[in-house]
Structure formats: C-alpha cells, structure tokens
Amino acid sequence: MSKNTLFVIPILLLVFFIGLTSCNNKSKNDYLKESISQYQDSTKSIEVIKYIPREYSEIKTDTILSNGFIVKVKTFSNMNTPLIKNSKLNFVNYKNYFRPIECDVIVFKNNKRIFKEYINVEFVSKHLSKTEDLEDYINNSISIDQEASLLSNKLVLTASVYKPESTNCISYQIIIDESGNYTTEKIETNART
C-alpha cells in the first residue's frame, strides 16, 4: 500500500466515527417542537382584561299607556356584580367581566303604586320554571310590550337573560294586572330550519 492510502484510511475512519456519534435520530420537526416547548416555558403569559360594558350607563323611561298604567323603568349597568369568563389562547389569558343590565320597575294604576321590583337574574330564577339553570346568565334588557298591554288590559313587560360568549338567550314576560298581581312566563321560541 502506498503512503497516501495509509494516510487516507485513518481520516476516513475519523470522519465516519464523528458522523456516527453526532447522529441522534432527531428530525427537524423534533428540534422545532423542542424549541417551541422551551420558548413556552420561558415566556410569561399575558393577561387581557375586558369590561363589558366598559362604563356605567343608565336610562330612565316614563311611559303612560292609554289603559291607565304608568310605568317608570330605570335600566342600568350593575358595576358591582360582574360575571367573569376566563379563556386562554396561546400565551394570552383573557378575563372578561360581563356587567349585567338590571332594572328598577315601578308601576302605577289610577295614581296608586301597584308594583315595585328590582329585575335581575335572581328575579328571573325565582319566578321562572325551576327547570332553567341560570347560573351563568345575566340580565340583558326589559321593554314594555305596548300592543299586548293594550289588548289584554294588563301591563306586559318583555325581558331577557343571556349567557355571555354563547347564543343562549331566554326571553320572558312579566304580566301585571290592575291590582299589581303578576305572573312570569317564558316566551317559547322556535328556530326555523
């Protein structure tokens, strides 16, 4: 054998040995996953807080119906008892504070106060069927159904509660007679298919 061949064989063996020892069977995908995992472990999460509605709002309405009912409604955002919904997406923790819309309702008939109630989700829970689970619901709105009130010679209020971050909404009526006695009925809705 020549001197060159004797010199080349140890170099080839050295290259072959280094190649075998540096090979650990990890693919680029494995390295990427490992790198992402290390990054996630070293990164602190971000918290995003959102208030819905952001600021206090209040609306007062006084309505006089031709059937003799006088209705005073104060609708406001309750800033003290939000429903908190948490969610997480990647490194961001979302914390949404849903503030319920609640109402003070006072009804008069023949210059005499016949009804005074604070309408919120607890009122609805107390007066609707016990089959409704309203734990994650908040009050949404209230209005006077003038046509139904005039046709029935009673006061008919229409209101709703909803579950934030969903499409679940329950509408109901509060029907008040001239003596101030009232009933609460769920409005059944049928979706069109």
Image (cartoon, rainbow, N blue to C red):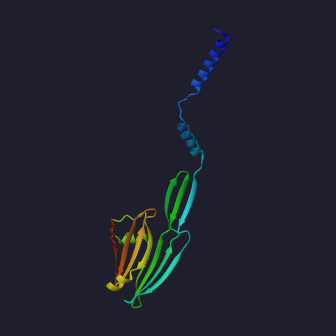
For the image, the number of numbered tags is: 0
In percent of the image, x 45 and y 64: which residue is there? 164
Q: Position of residue 78 (x, y in %)?
A: 51, 71
Asked if one can make out residue 99 in the rendered structure from this viewpoint, the answer is yes
Displayed quadrant of residue 118? bottom left
> Looking at the image, which is closer to me, 18 or 178?
18
Task: Name the image quarter holding the N terminus.
Answer: top right
Comparing 97 with 18, the one in front is: 18
On the rendered image, what quadrant is the C terminus found in?
bottom left
Residue 46 occupies quadrant: bottom right
Relative to residue 81, is residue 26 depicted above or below? above
Q: Residue at x 59, y 27 (%)?
A: 22
Residue 47 location (% of width, % of height): 57, 56
Say which residue appears at 55% left-offset and 40% top-offset: 32
**Residue most toward the bottom?**
110
| Residue drawn at x 44%, y 74% as measured from the top left | 141
Residue situated furthest top in the rendering: 1
Q: Is residue 132 above or below residue 61?
A: above
Q: Does residue 180 appear anywhere in the picture?
A: no
Q: Is residue 107 above or below residue 51?
A: below
Tell me if 39 is positioned left or right of 193 in this view.
Answer: right
Compared with 58, 134 (above or below) is above
Residue 112 point in image, percent of width and height = 40, 89
Front residue of 149 and 120: 149
Q: In x, y percent, where is residue 28? A: 55, 36
